[in-house]
Image (cartoon, rainbow, N blue to C red):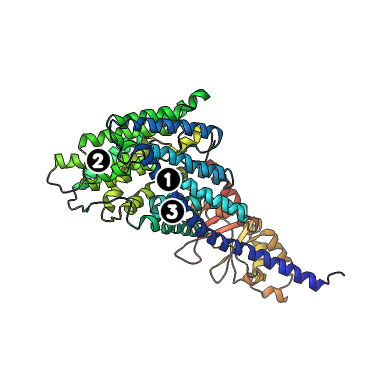
């Protein structure tokens, strides 16, 4: 039995309705899955942190101190296990996790294997728990991204949604690790995806909040660090915070240069030597702890807390910062999986507390506490070394729960970021991607790019302008008598409601041919009525120039309007004007 025309039309309408509903269903599913991903990621990060704490007590003891031989044995033996498992079982767990998540987004359509996620969990926990100078935040980010990748593949979402799910999970993992949802959201937007839509932002927020809610069921809602009371009473203290910004910017340069040199140097060594590099790094890091500085081993959160409460002398603070840079450079460059966030915060806290003590020594009348300088120092190095200036400000506020220090944080972070930008043009994560033979988009470069706008290609309105209130007979006479109007490739019609219509010569000739005598009915039709109800798009000088390109399929020229005066013409754009402007700018 053949379908009747009515059945065919009804069937096609039903199919069209279903196809329109499919994206809406997928969007709702996307939001629901974001909450589920946040919950699972939060549980995994809690388990990850517990595993690190358990391994730390098991391998380093409950109170690690100098002259304990296990401080050397534990990271060295763990390095052997990590090297073997990385070589033969988990080949993709090297690195911090940030670049791997970006690669999943931009290269692998959001794919992170289950094996890589498991390996990251196990080997990072073993490395940090045994004393390697690395942190748990970056691996937590990749673990969350792996959860999102796994779940999204099982559900069978579209490729576009699969790609976006990796940063959604990354935000959940980082938020649970930091107990700081705002910082996690900003970091993922600032350094992983760069650009976002309302739907993506909503999913990232839901996953991050869900993960933090789960984590706080185990750890409580208190901030990560116990911050003493902070109050900036003397404006002259801002000068000391500015000095801290300079110190942090220079320290970040030393840190980045050390990693940028040693990491490729070790990776270029013979294969057999790479198998012993994590163990050798563990020996050196353990030796640093054995001979007097066990605080540099592991993530170092306890030492950060002590620095904030003034428990270290000035010389000790500087030595801890120096040895932490050395230990982290060795651990990370050897291929041991682990993150850079915690070491960055550690170095920043030590440098900040040392600047605070120097201020007390030189200017005893100032009342600033070393805890406030340690806190700001954490943000300073985060902004300068990891090159996430916006995240660094909110990270300090969230991990401390203290919002009275916002002005020193902004001042010092900005100075450190600008110094780092000038002395080390390539951000550290981007440097790592280049060393790995990858070329992921640089979010810092994207932020610095100046997009072309309509005003950059705008030309004076040299085309004839006709009034939409004129009759077709008058327009016909104008075209016959005005050679300029007849020869122009297009004309602009200004309608009475202050809108515009761009007509090409073919349209005008076709309309004029319909009228051969003044007494014909069509002769007295207004030009704007003959043009119909369609109008050129309303565009303004400050809008992105790339937005103009799709419109040239329909319109020969585009009138650009003034935002303050309806109907006022700023100029016109043609396709040739736009292309020439892009050619002059080298395509940017």
356 vs 243, nearest the viewer? 356
406 vs 303, nearest the viewer? 303
Snapshot quadrant of residue 79: top left
Quadrant where the image shows the N terminus: bottom right
Mark 1 and mark 2 in contact? Answer it, CB < 8 Å: no
Give me the disc on residue 51: 1
Give me the disc on residue 185: 3
The mark nearer the N terminus, 1 or 2, is: 1
Question: As drawn, is 17 to the left or to the right of 52?
Answer: right
Q: Looking at the picture, how far across and down is residue 326, in whole percent? A: 35, 31
Taking the spot 51% from the left edge, 49% from the top edge, the residue there is 145
Q: Looking at the picture, how far across and down is residue 87, in whole percent? A: 53, 32
Between the C-alphas of marks 1 and 3, the distance is 25 Å
356 vs 132, nearest the viewer? 132
Assign a secondary structure to mark 2: helix
Snapshot quadrant of residue 554: bottom right
Taking the spot 23% from the left edge, 52% from the top edge, the residue there is 228
Report crowding for label 1: few under 14, some 14 to 19, many 20 or more residues within 10 A (C-alpha).
some
Question: As drawn, is 406 to the left or to the right of 137?
Answer: left
Assign a secondary structure to mark 1: helix
Between the C-alphas of marks 1 and 2, the distance is 39 Å
Q: Is residue 95 visible?
A: yes
Between the C-alphas of marks 2 and 3, the distance is 30 Å
Assign a secondary structure to mark 3: helix
481 vs 441, nearest the viewer? 441
Q: Is residue 387 visible?
A: no
Snapshot quadrant of residue 555: bottom right
Q: Looking at the picture, how far across and down is residue 290, in whole percent? A: 30, 30
Report crowding for label 2: few under 14, some 14 to 19, many 20 or more residues within 10 A (C-alpha).
some
Question: As drawn, is 582 to the left or to the right of 134?
Answer: right
Give me the disc on residue 243: 2
């Amino acid at each position: 039995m053949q379908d009747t025309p009515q059945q065919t039309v009804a069937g096609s309408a039903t199919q069209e309705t279903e196809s329109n509903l499919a994206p809406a269903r997928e969007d709702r599913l996307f939001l629901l899955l974001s909450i589920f991903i946040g919950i699972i990621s939060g549980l995994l990060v809690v388990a990850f942190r517990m595993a690190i704490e358990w391994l730390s007590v098991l391998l380093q003891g409950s109170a690690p101190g100098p002259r304990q031989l296990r401080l050397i044995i534990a990271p060295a033996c763990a390095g052997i296990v990590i090297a073997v498992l990385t070589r033969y079982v988990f080949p993709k767990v090297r690195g911090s996790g940030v670049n791997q998540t970006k690669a999943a987004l931009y290269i692998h359509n959001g794919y992170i294997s289950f094996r890589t996620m498991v390996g990251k969990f196990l080997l990072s926990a073993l490395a940090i728990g045994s004393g390697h100078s690395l942190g748990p935040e970056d691996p937590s980010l990749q673990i969350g991204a792996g959860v999102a990748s796994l779940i999204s593949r099982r559900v069978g979402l579209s490729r576009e949604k699969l790609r976006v799910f990796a940063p959604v999970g990354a935000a959940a993992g980082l938020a649970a690790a930091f107990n700081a949802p705002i910082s996690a959201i900003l970091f993922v937007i600032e350094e992983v995806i760069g650009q976002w839509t309302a739907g993506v932002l909503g999913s990232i927020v839901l996953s991050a909040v869900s993960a933090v809610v789960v984590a706080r069921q185990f750890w409580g809602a208190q901030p990560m660090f116990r911050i003493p009371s902070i109050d900036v009473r003397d404006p002259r203290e801002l000068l000391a915070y500015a000095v801290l910004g300079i110190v942090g910017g220079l320290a970040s340069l030393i840190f980045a240069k050390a990693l940028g040199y040693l990491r490729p140097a070790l990776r270029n060594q013979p294969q057999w030597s790479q198998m012993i590099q994590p163990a050798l790094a563990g020996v050196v890091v353990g030796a640093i702890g054995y001979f007097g500085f066990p605080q540099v081993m592991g993530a170092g959160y306890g030492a950060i807390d002590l620095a904030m409460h003034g428990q270290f002398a000035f010389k000790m603070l500087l030595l801890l910062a120096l040895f932490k840079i050395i230990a982290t450079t060795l651990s990370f460059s050897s291929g041991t999986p682990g993150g850079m966030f915690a070491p960055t915060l550690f170095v920043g806290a030590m440098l900040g507390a040392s600047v605070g003590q120097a201020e007390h020594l030189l200017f005893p009348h100032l009342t600033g506490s070393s805890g406030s300088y340690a806190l700001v120092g954490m943000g300073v190095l985060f902004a300068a070394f990891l090159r996430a200036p916006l995240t660094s400000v909110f990270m300090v506020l969230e991990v401390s729960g203290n919002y009275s220090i916002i002005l020193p944080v902004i001042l010092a972070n900005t100075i450190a970021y600008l110094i780092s930008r000038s002395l080390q043009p390539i951000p550290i994560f981007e440097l790592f991607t280049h060393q790995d033979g990858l070329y992921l988009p640089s979010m810092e470069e994207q932020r610095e790019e100046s997009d072309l706008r309509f005003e950059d290609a705008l030309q004076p309105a040299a085309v004839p302008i006709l009034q939409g209130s004129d009759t077709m007979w008058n327009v016909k006479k104008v075209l016959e008598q005005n050679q300029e109007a007849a020869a122009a490739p297009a004309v602009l019609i200004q309608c009475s409601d202050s809108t515009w219509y761009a007509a090409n010569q073919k349209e005008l000739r076709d309309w004029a041919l319909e009228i051969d005598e003044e007494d014909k009915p069509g002769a007295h039709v207004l030009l704007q009525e003959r043009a119909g109800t369609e109008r050129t798009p309303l565009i303004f000088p400050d809008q992105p120039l790339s937005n103009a390109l799709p419109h040239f399929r329909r319109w020969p020229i585009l009138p650009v309007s003034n935002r303050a005066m309806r109907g006022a013409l700023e100029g016109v754009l043609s396709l040739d004007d736009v292309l020439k402007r892009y050619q002059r700018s080298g395509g940017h």
